Amino acid sequence: MGLLITGGEIVTAETRTRGDILIEGETISAIGLGLKAPAGTEVIDVTGKLIFPGFIDPHVHIHLPFMATFAKDTHATASKAALVGGTTTYIEMVCPSRTEDTMEGYQKWKKKAEGNSACDYAFHMAVTRWDAQTEAQLREIVADGTASFKIFLSYKNFFGVTDEEMFHTLKLAAELGVITTAHCENPELVGQLQQLLLSEGKTGAEWHEPSRPESVEAEGTGRFATFLEQTGAAGYVVHLSCEPALRAAVEAKLRGVKIYVESVLPHFLLNKIYAERAGVEGMKYIMSPPLRHERNLQVLWRALGAGLIDTVGTDHCPFDTEQKLLGTKAFTQIPNGIPGIEDRVNLMYTYGVKRGGLDIHRFVDALSTKPAKIFGLFPRKGTIAVDSDADLVIYDTAYRGKISVKTQHTNNDYNGFEGVEIDGRPAVVTVRGKVQVRDGVFVGEPGRGRMLKRVPQYGHKHEEVREVVHAD
Ligand code: URP
Ligand code: ZN
Ligand code: ZN
């Protein structure tokens, strides 16, 4: 059965127009005023509401063995949370540890997702070791449709790569035309500062930020950029948190380095005071890079508005209270991460577009279109156009509510944004033409999600990202 959405205002990264949208099968077949519903088509009148392209979260962790435990979500729980919050596609980081075989890790991550996600998904492949076998496996993984890598400059001896390994990874990425995403912090400095602070009896969560200060992130960002410059690879800085790191990335952009910048939800709304709360309340806000001094928040909002920050993800990574308490004796043992997949769209709409003067088209661009373009999903995803997948978010700007753990779908026993007001939420969410959410309730097909296969799109000459459609 088809779907005709009537009466809404269609908002993309470029335009805002009134129009009906006809969906036949999984894609949009027509857009225009006064469209007629073919026999058997369900008509949904969305007068007074905005229609956005399905939002894309370019950075999530679902299966993640990390810091002596595992992140709490499954694809079943995370995808429902994503959809209720308006995210119709996410890109998960496949993160085997240095001691695991890369291909085995990739297959394991794929298996966990297959048939279990209610929304579409893709993967970034983390490179956590380097040898001839890993290189051969990475070539196979790219050929399988996972056309982006992830490296961690931090988390030494676990996920982290050495400079030599980064060099080899980026050489391969440049050869294959895939983009490499990177967690940028200097591992040596983090390790030394952690030991110094602990030796002074500074063990609480409030010492996490001083153990990885802004300059440590700026150094990592600058070094990653230099390696991109020298290898000719394209890169993407994940979860950038502060002005010095932003300056390092922007300086590289100005030199012509092909480098994109992502920041994530917590860094726009929360500051380091949250992590300085006593006991487990502070531990709930431990992530890396850490929450920063308040002064950075305005800088990030301005950079987002100006397009210096390309995308907004979440780095969704839920650990519950009991897991956070693993760090009772030392902040270095607190599992790093905070959930956000369910709240990114509503919070960025409320505090960006509604209350903060962020241009609505930049909002759509940063949360949907740009991730689709950078990671080879556009125009299948990331826009509302004939032949694009019918992933739509019909947004109720009249809704008023508050975020609460009591109503969330994310598998966690707290929400870092508890009690925060939101000025809007998705009323209807579709995934490839199927209604998956109505008014905050998941009503769809739990296993509807498919893995999105992508092809490399970064040539040696650093052309701007090409707009290509990819087959599964
Ligand atoms: O603290 C964080 N960010 N946890 C998830 C792992 C990572 O570094 O992305
Ligand atoms: Zn990271
Ligand atoms: Zn992450």
Image (cartoon, grey):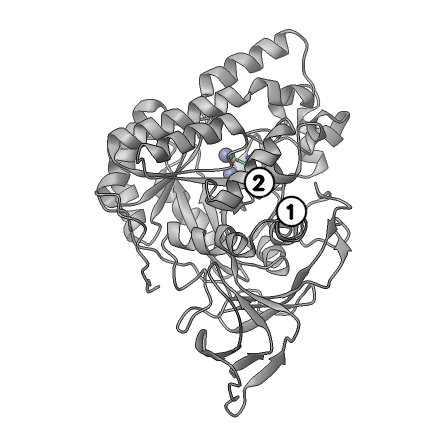
* Residue 171 on image: x %, y %: 25, 34
Q: Looking at the image, is 50 positioned above or below residue 311?
A: below
Q: Give how far across and how far down residue 447 sits, in percent.
A: 53, 65
User: Reading the chain from its start, which is encountered first: label 2 or label 1?
Assistant: 2
- Tell me if residue 323 can be seen: yes
**Viewer-nearest residue: 325 or 262:** 262
Q: Which residue is mark 2?
A: 301
Q: Position of residue 228 (x, y in %)?
A: 31, 32
User: Could you tell me which secondary element the residue under label 1 belongs to?
Assistant: helix
* Residue occupying image coordinates x 36% and y 23%: 162
**Is residue 140 found left or right of 120 in the rendered image?**
left
Residue closest to the eye, 254 or 449: 254
Q: Does the CB distance between marks 2 and 1 fall below 8 Å? A: yes
Residue flagged by tag 2: what amino acid is it? Trp
| Residue nearest the observer in this picture, 72 or 297 | 297
- Density class for disc 1 (Cα within 10 Å; few <14, some 14-19, many ≥20) is few
Where the C terminus falls, by quadrant?
Answer: bottom left
Q: CA distance from mark 2 to mark 1?
A: 9 Å
Report the side of 392 relative to 230 (left or right): right
Determine whether 207 is above or below 458 in the image.
Answer: above
The residue that mark 1 highlights is 356
